[in-house]
Structures are given as structure tokens and as C-alpha cells.
Amino acid sequence: MYKLIWHMAWNALGRRRGRSLLVTLMIGASLWGLLFMEGIYDGMTEQMIDNTVKSDSGNLSLFAQGYRLDPSLDRLLPDSLLNQQILRTNPLIKSRSIRFSHTGLLATAHAARQVQIQGVPLEEEIVHAGLSDKLAQGRLHFGSDGNGAILGHGLAGKLRVSIGQKIILSAQDRQQNINSLVLKVNGIIRSGNQPIDDKILYMDIEQCREFLGVSQGFSQLSLILHNPDNTALLQEQLLRELDDSAIEILRWDQLYPALLQGRQVMKTFNLICNLLVFCVAGLGVWGVMTVSVLERLREFGIMIAVGTSFQQIRAQVLLESTLLGLGGFILGAGSGVATLLWFVEHGLNLEVFQEGLQAFGMDTIIYAIIRPDYFTTALIAILLACTASVILPLRRLKQARPVTILNSQ
Amino acid sequence: MQLLLRYSLIGLILFSATPLVAADAESLLQEMEDRLYGDTAIIKLAMVVGNRRGERRMEMESYSSGRDRNFIKITYPAKDRGITFLKIDNGLWQYVPRIEKIIKIPAAMMLQSWMGSDFSNDDLVRESLLSRDYHSSISAEDDETWTLELTARAEAPVVWGRLLVVLSREHLLPLRVDYYDEENQLIRTLEYSRYSEMGGRIYPARWFMQPREAGQEERWTRIDVMEAAFDLDIPEETFSKRALKRLSR
Amino acid sequence: MFLDLAWKNICSQRRRSLVTVLLLLFATAILVFSGAFMEGSHRQMIRSAVEIYPSYLQITGNGYRDEPGVDRLVFDLAALNNVLNAQSEVALATSRYESFALLVSDHQALGALLAAVEPDKEAQVSRLKQSLIRGEYLSNNDQNQVYLGRELAQRLKVDVGSNLAFVGSGADSSFAADRLHVKGIFQTGLFDFDNSSAFVNRTYIEPLMALDNTASHVIVLPHNPDQVQDLARLLSQRLPPELGLEVRSWQETMSGLVEAMTVDSIFGYLTLSVLFLVILFVITIYTLLAIMARTREIGILRAIGSSQRQIFTLLLLEGLILTLAGVIPGGMLGGAFAWYFQENPFSFSAWEEQFKQYNLAVSTLPALFSLTQILRDMIIMTLAALMAMLVPLLRVTRLRPTEAMRHV
């Protein structure tokens, strides 16, 4: 029975090959366009978020109360915090890094710039911030004597320093004295986060504490989770377990609300695009199906006359439109995946717009993202559009009473 | 090769001939600094700053003890009279009578020019001990001078990569210092001249600082030492923050 | 004759006609409005970024922009003003002297930009005055009054009426210091700017900083802001070379922002093109269906002696009528929306934070009503629609009459 319907539907589509092909092509092309757009835009958004999360906020960050408003060397988190059971063994946490931040002045014989000093345990920071991917020049090492430094590439550019060069760091220590220290540029990073690229100087945290006259403590504990969806959960756990009003525990989206907003805007935007595109595509299918049903009124009349039920005819028409949709889906999804995979691998190179993109914290090479829900959303939308498109033609078929048509012709 | 031989020969001869030369570059440098700064020094000086628009003269009194304590009072022009500076170790404070405030110069201002000269606040604070911050060696010499080549010690917080100090044999005082950056590019030159007797010793009465970087050729700073006294007792009081205001008048 | 026939055909194929017209109407309206909105909002973003402080056209000493310093000032302000005043294109010119100074409160000493401005003129070239949130803006007679950015005031822990002091240096690099009273506090929304800028009246600070006849910037307001690039070129030629000056329009001083907006437009149009792709496909499909339904009729026409060209013209005319029936009201609809939102800009108060993070201080975004853009978009749409119809049209005209007549 089903085999018969399948057979008839297939034949019907085949009879008007040009038309069927055009509809399939339409669905395929629009799906391809949508997938490309979604993949690139999401890639862009996620890259921005990822840059910020890794280089600064983590999924969660802990600060001493009041530090963010008034970042002084007296508002530090104690080292003992790191021994807390929940921070050591929590299975949600993928990596953590502590940072010791202060402002200072970095000088060469030619120029001087204000910098954000970031004392870090390098090994942890490399893993945590994914520094290996961000390295633009040199290497990620503070040297055997701990006097190496890693600079943001914007900062290095402004100071005109290169790898191996000597730089002098000055800063006011906790006792309000101005101290100076010689460092050597070991590495230059490009994080994609402009404030960081323009201002950051990474150095060894122990060296940094000694330099600033602080015996223990750190300014920020940044946590990255295995699954970012658990961020709020971990925040709750930490708030409960640490139960310390001297500690502020903030999610990345609390630290950078604009980024979250950006992501939501992008999601809504993608959804609206999907909706619009498939509504219009549905119109196309509707036109084709209407004509193809009306053309075959006589044929359907005969079928009913020989005992075929209306349900069977309905199933056949529905199958026809679904086949068209599925064909388009396979075409679009296939070419879309192929295109996106290329951009996942090679990225979309927008170096010509470097200055503009960096102002928005974006990388110049945008790597696409492929999410399964692109395809499920599209498939559902296509199936809905195809189903909806045969409702009217079928109703007309039913009203037309095939027998009358047979007689009239 | 011949040249090299001749130089090493001269070196050998000098080495054995003059007892002073037997001392290495390090001691020469030490001696030079002692003679230049003394244990304590009270100096009256004029600082003239020139640029493409003309020149500007300031006068001041400077009291120093060792290399890490320095008190300076501006005496001319009238509008700046009474501005005082105190440098203790690595801190720099300033008192401005017009605003009646003692200000600690923050790190961010350290590289700003000091009183509009080609010296920075940082030069003042870190008026570093050459003998402490640099390795030295004699790189050349003739009948009148030694040229010392100073390279920054690895741990010394100085921006320069290398200094060339031309030292007068006669006075054991500097004639010229060339400041090079790490890429061996000449950044500025400081020349000492007009040697004359002051405060019981021979002393360079004129110091001339000339930036050498592109675009700064028209700038210069000249220091004319008017009076100097060395190794006198300066009251401890002078090097305290209270003195900033008290001695301002 | 053709027209009558075409019209009859359009009426007889109501579904195709309706869908085609409506889709084109919708597409044109969207294209026109999106274009107007993108252009308008980008202009607004750039405008507010430009107008907050940098302003449309800056004149500085040669090389000052790359490396500010007292060696690279405008050294003969009077001479420059003379030249500027003689230009009919210049509406207003005002000077600024920017320097880096230490601001000292009872709690804090912070380095900041201390700029001397001509208060009345400055109010016309930048949004400094409009950004006032507490106290008062500067006046031309002010003595030691200072106008502070909000975040800077917070860091210094001062408010309107508080005392402050500055320590800095003058145009001759001489030492300059004085007490200041906080007269007003401003907030432009640009965090970096509000966090590090302070303004004083130029006539007050002139003697203290020995400004004489110098300035770090001269800001020029053109009569027609759209022609600022031309004016910049013109001034570059007309300014005597011995003054050693450099003229920059905002397109150059803010090239990063301009570029960011271009990127945004490109992505915007890319998105629209996906939607248009599917719309044009649908138009192609409907044209194809319409023509197939009439294959027989076309065969008869051919048989009674119409030439291929005549039939093609007839079909094309039908298409053109449909296209225009969609595109013209679509353009008008889009234009109406553009007009409405030009007069009543979108309010994005919820997005303000996001904009600020990118140093864009805007809370409303208008569309830009531009006839040229609307006409351009309508022409593009018309051509695209005709292209979409062409494929099936060409196919049908190739049919031979006998073949077509046999067609059911």
C-alpha cells in the first residue's frame, strides 16, 4: 500500500522534472544561505565571548569585595581560598587560574606606556586562557630567572619592542613606593580582546607579588567549566559553600552583560531569518503543489472512482511535497555543511577590515561554527512549510468532487 | 691586526706605568662618581631649556647626600619660586606653594619631563649609580681620555642598553656620555665642559644634554653650575617631607 | 494592443500575479527600509562618536596625531585663524590645547587629559556642553573652574564645588600648577573619555601655561558636514606650508569606526541577500507555472502568425507590470517607514550598555530617508525580478507552435 503511494508520488514528481528541480533547488539554496549565515555569525559571537571568557572573566570569577570598584593592593583574595574543598575538587570546574593585577608603567629608551600588570602562574594560565593559540611571536615562558614577560601585541607595537628586548616596569607598591624592575620580552600575544592586547603585561605571579610588596593573595580567581551551562549552578554552590561576604562571585555575563545581549540578539535574529525564509519558500511549494493538484483533478477523479480513499490521495500529495522539501534539505544541508566545514577549518579572512573588527573585539579571521540545531530547526521549518503548502490544494481537491469533474470533461 | 697590536701594547704600557690605570674600569667609574657627586653636595645651578621656540631659564638649589637623597628648590623664575622636590630612595615628592600641596609623583608620571627639561622625573629618581647598574670596561683611550663602555647589568632597572663615557684623564671627570638603547641606537648625549674650580675641586660648570632621536634635534637642556660646595654637613631635616613645605619659603 | 492583452492575462492568473506582486512589495519594502535603517543608524553612531569630542575636522601640527608633544603644536594660531576666517565653507573654528596633567584631590593624584577650550565655541563643535549632568558648563569668563568627566570625578572623589589642583606643564614646557574648583560634571557615555578628561577655560589658563599663540588642535565646523572631506583637501592646499600643519577629516581620525560600520553593512546586506534569493526563486517558479499553464494559448498565438519576439515582448510586459506593481508600492512603503523612523528614531535604551562597551554613546537609532537610495533599491529589485522571470520566459519562446498546441 505505502509502496504504491510512494511509487505514485515519485512518478508525479518525475513527470514535472523541471518544476520539481526548481523547488528543490530553491529550498536547497535558501537553506545553504541560512546555514552559512548562522555558522559565520555564531562563530563571530562565540569568538568574542570566548576571547573574553578565556582572557579575563572565565565562566565565573571571584574577587575580593569592592575590588572591582576600587582595585587596590589591599583588596585581595587570600591564598587559603584555593585550598577550599569546593574549589579543589568540584567536578564542574575544568580549569582555574589566579591573577594578580595592578597598574604600572612600562618603559623603553624611546617610550613609556601605562600597562595592566597581570601576575599569573604561567602553566595554569596557558591552559586556562588558551594562550598557546594566541601567541603571535616568541614563546610562552617567563625564563629560568622568572624575569620574562609576555605583552599584548598592541602594547608591544606602541612601545616598539620585539622579542628578547629589555623593558623597565615601574609601579607603586603596597607601601606606596615606586619600584622598578627589569623584564625581558619573551612573548607577544594577540588575544582578540582589544583592552587586553593594548594594555596587558603577563609576568610571574611570585615575582609580581615580591615587586609590589605583597606576601600573599591575588586579585582574581577565574574559573572555566567543562560545561558552561552549569555556570549558574556552580555560582550557587560557591555562594552557599564559601558563604563569605568578603568574596564576590560573578558570572561572565554579569561582568560583560553586553556580550550576553549580543548572543541573544543573534539568536533571535537567526530565528527571524529562518522564519521569513521558510515562509517565502513555503509560498513557492504551495504554488507548485496547487498547480500539480489542479492539473491532476481528472487523474484523482479516476482514482476515487476506482475506490481509492481520499486519505490515500492526501497521503500521496503530502508525500510529494515532503519529498520536495527533503530533497531541498539534503541539497542545502549537504552544501551548507561542506561550506561551513571549510570555514570551520580555514576561517573567513577579513583582514582588510582589521581596524574596524578589532574595535569590536573581533578577530580578523572568523571561524564558523556548526550546531546540530541549525539542521533540526531547518528540517522542522521545511517540513512545516511543505505540509502547510498542501492544505489549500487538498481542500480544493475535496471541494471539487472528482466525480463531477470526470463527468464534465 | 697591526692596529690591534699597537693598542694592546699601549694598554700594556699604560697598565704597568700608571698606578691609577692599574685600577680597572670599575674603579675609574667609582672615582668619577665620587668626584662628581661627593658625599654631600650643595649646588646652585641654572637650567636652560631650549626648543624651536626659544629658550627658558630656571634657577635652583640642590642639596644631595649620597646618591639616594636629594632636595631641590626652584628659585627662579618668580612664578615657580618655592617649588620644592624631595627624592628619597625611589620616591619623588613635590611641593607646589601655589596649590599648597605635597604631591607624590605617581608611577604614571615618572616618564614625564622634569620641569620641562630633557630630564624625566625618572632620571631624577633613578639618577642611578653607574658603578652599581652597569658592567664597565675600557673600550678606548688616548693621551687625554679614557672611553668606558658601560653595559647594563641584567637585573638593573635602567632603560639604556649601553653607555659610552668619555673620561678626562686629568680630572677623572666625565667629558661626554652617550646613551644608547638596546638596539645600539644613540638616543641622547650629555656633555660636560667648562672645567673650573668650585667648592675646592675641579668641576664641570656646564652640562649639556642633547636628544639625538629623529625629530628632537631642536631640543636641548643645559645646566650651568653657578656655585658648588662639597662634603659639608647637611642637616638630616633637609631630607624629610616636612622640609618640602618649610624650606619652600 | 499588447498592454490590453497583458493586463487581461495578469487578471486571469490571479494567484501568480498576487504572489509575485506581494513578494516584490515585501522584498522592496524590506530592502529600502533595511538600507535606510543601516545607513541611518551607522551615521548616527559615527556622528555621535564624532560629535562627542573629536568633531568633524581637526587641524594639528605636523605629526602631532602620531606623537603629541610641544614640538608639534599649532604655533601660529592667529595666522591659521586668519586663513580659516577667509573660507566661506568654514562655519566656525575653535582651538584646543590638550596636555597631560596630574590632578590632585584631597584623596588622590591622577594623571588625566587637561584641555583648555574656548567654552562658547566648543559648545558648538562638540557635545561637551550637552553632556553636562551636574553643576554648570564652563563660560568664557571662568577663572579656575574645571569641568570634569563623571568617572574621573568619581576616582578623584570630588563633586561639584570641590577643590582640586592640577600640576602640569605649559606650551613652553614650563611648570604650571594651580587650584581648581569643580564647576560641572559631564558624562558623554564614552567610558574612556569620561574616565580621563578635564576641561578649563582657555583665557584662564593661557598665561599659566604660556599658551600665547599656540594650540594643540584647531577644530573646524564646516557649513555642510557632508563635504568635510572636500574641505579638508581644500584647506590642506590653502594653508601656507610654513605653518607646518596637518588637516584631518573625521573619516581619517576615526577610520576604525568607519570601517566597523562598513563591515556591519556588508553583513547586513549578506543576510538580506539570502532572503532575496528565496524570494526570487519563488518568483521564477510562479512565472514558470503561469507560462506552462498558457503553453497552449501561446501555441495558438504563434499559429495565427505572432512572431517569437512579439510573444516574448508580451510576456515580458506582463512581468514588468507585475514587477512595477510590487516594487513601486514596496519602495513607497519602505520609504514611508524610513521617513517615519527618521522622524521618530528607534529607542534602544536597553542596548545602551552594549554600545557603551564599544565606546558608542547612542540610545536612539534613526533611519535615513534618502530618495537616491530608495530609487537605487527599487531599480535593483526590478532588475532582479526581471532576471528571475527571464529563465522561464526564454524557455517558452523556444517552443514550436505545433508542440505547444498539443500541450494539455
Image: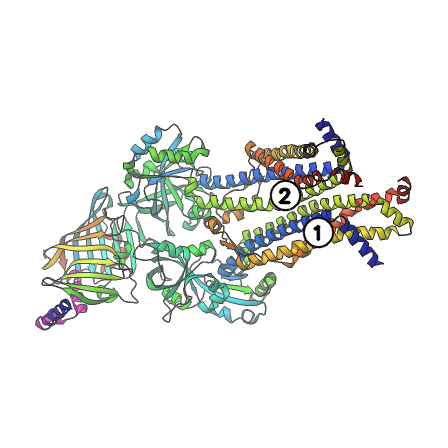
Kind of residue indicated by mark 1: Ala
Q: Nearer the viewer, residue B52 or C398?
A: C398
Kindly identify which numbered label has been placed on residue A381. Answer: 1
Q: How far is disc 2 from disc 1 in space, using C-alphas? A: 18 Å
Count of marks overlaid on the render: 2
Instruction: Give the left or right position of residue C111, taking residue A127 as reference.
Output: left
Instruction: Give the left or right position of residue B96, taking residue C149 as reference.
Output: left
User: Which residue is rendered at x = 76% and y = 33% of the image?
Assistant: C303
Q: Is residue C120 above or below residue C164?
A: above
Spot occupied by residue A149 in the image (x, y as percentages of width and height): 39, 64
Kindly identify which numbered label has been placed on residue C276. Answer: 2
Q: Is residue C187 above or below residue C329?
A: below
Kind of residue indicated by mark 2: Phe
User: SS of the residue at dot 2?
Assistant: helix
Indicate whether residue A236 is drawn in magenta.
no
Q: Is residue A145 visible?
A: yes
What range is drawn magenta here? Answer: B13-40
Mark 2 burial class by Cα count in 10 Å: few <14, some 14-19, many 20+: many
- Are tags 2 and 1 found on a single chain? no
Spot occupied by residue B171 in the image (x, y as percentages of width and height): 11, 62
Indicate whether residue B23 is drawn in magenta.
yes
Give the letter of the chain under mark 1: A
Instruction: Give the left or right position of residue B234, taking residue C20 as reference.
Output: left
Q: Nearer the viewer, residue C316 or C138?
A: C316
